[in-house]
Image (cartoon, rainbow, N blue to C red):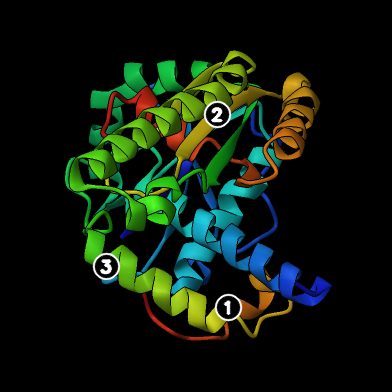
Amino acid sequence: MIHLYGVVEELEGLPPVAGVDAGRLERRRIEGLELVISRTGEESDVTQEAVLSHAHVVEELMARSAAVLPARFGSAFSDEQELADAVRTKASALARGLSIVRGCFEFGLRVLGGDGAAENASNDLSGRDYMRTRLAEEKARRRLAQELHEPLARLSRASVRFGGASSDLLQSAYLVPRQDVAVFGEHVRGLEATHSGLTIICTGPWPPYTFAANGEGGEK
Amino acid sequence: MSMSEQKTLKQQVTLLELVDRVLNKGVVVSGDITLSVADVDLVYVGLRVLLSSVATLEEPRERISTAGAAL
């Protein structure tokens, strides 16, 4: 099988690291796009080692190129022909994706807290008042999440808010141009200082996994 | 929280975020992804496994590969 790490732009040279299953990294050029791959066994398992190998290679590519569109772990092809066909059908979307992430890092944000007012007061409230308090609390949470998110989104080339079943106040990702990373970090530290009751977890810089998925018009 | 506890927590969070990205996001070039890694159960169980095994780690990247627990 062929394991794909990502699409790269202006790669200086392959990093001196092994790929998944200790495979040797190789470059391929298809439709004007440069790809980094390695060969793996027939059945490549999702092990911690494999996931971290993939992530390590992507990070090393990030350090040696103008842009990387990281592949999701598990993008495997049976042979060179299948890889070439798949890339050809997506070539324009991949090129577009590269132009979006060029010169940027991804940062992840999770904010926890900002709830509990209704729970704390529940003993003294009627059912109706309890629900009203809950509603007011939910509105306040949404407002707060938006207040935290908006200024960070303005500092970013692109941003995504994740919804779903998460109980987090805010879960989001930001695509931040290299030259704006310091300002972005300062802003996050400012949020930590002004919202001491919230747990604010900012991680990064990451390769732009989240925005590679968006660039292809994919899910999430 | 002590400094070492904080460090361990930071490593756990970083690893969780990393795994979430590598398995759930990124560009998908092939039409059919060979492993159903977006399956919620798989990722969720994997994260729990990672959480329990990462607690003993000092160097997250280097040492985790020897932990051997499958996702």
Left or right relative to A177: residue A113: left
Specify the quadrant that holds the N terminus of chain B.
bottom right
- Tell me the amino acid under the disc marked 3: Leu
Residue A45 appears in the picture as rendered = no
Identify the chain of the residue marked 3, using the numbered disc in the image.
B
Q: Which residue is identified by label 2?
A: A174
Can you give x and y, in whole percent of width and height, for residue A3 in the image?
Answer: 38, 55
Pick the residue in front: A43 or A172: A172
Q: Which residue is identified by label 3?
A: B42
Picture quadrant of residue A216 = top left
- Tell me the amino acid under the disc marked 1: Val
Q: Secondary structure at mark 1?
A: helix
Counting other residues with Cα less than 10 Å from the Cα at mark 3, is it few (<14), some (14-19), or many (20 or more)? Answer: few
Q: Would you say the residues marked 2 and 3 are in contact, meaning their CB atoms lie under 8 Å apart?
A: no
Residue A171 appears in the picture as rendered = yes
Can you give x and y, in whole percent of width and height, for residue A186 in the image?
Answer: 79, 29
Q: Secondary structure at mark 3?
A: helix
Instruction: Please give the count of numbered marks on the rendered protein.
Output: 3
Q: Secondary structure at mark 2?
A: strand
Left or right relative to A125: residue B61: right
Identify the chain of the residue marked 2, using the numbered disc in the image.
A
For the point 74% across and 20% down, the residue is: A180
Please tell me if label 2 and label 3 are on a single chain.
no
Picture quadrant of residue B27 = top left
Can you give x and y, in whole percent of width and height, for residue B16 in the image?
Answer: 50, 61
Q: Which residue is identified by label 1?
A: B54
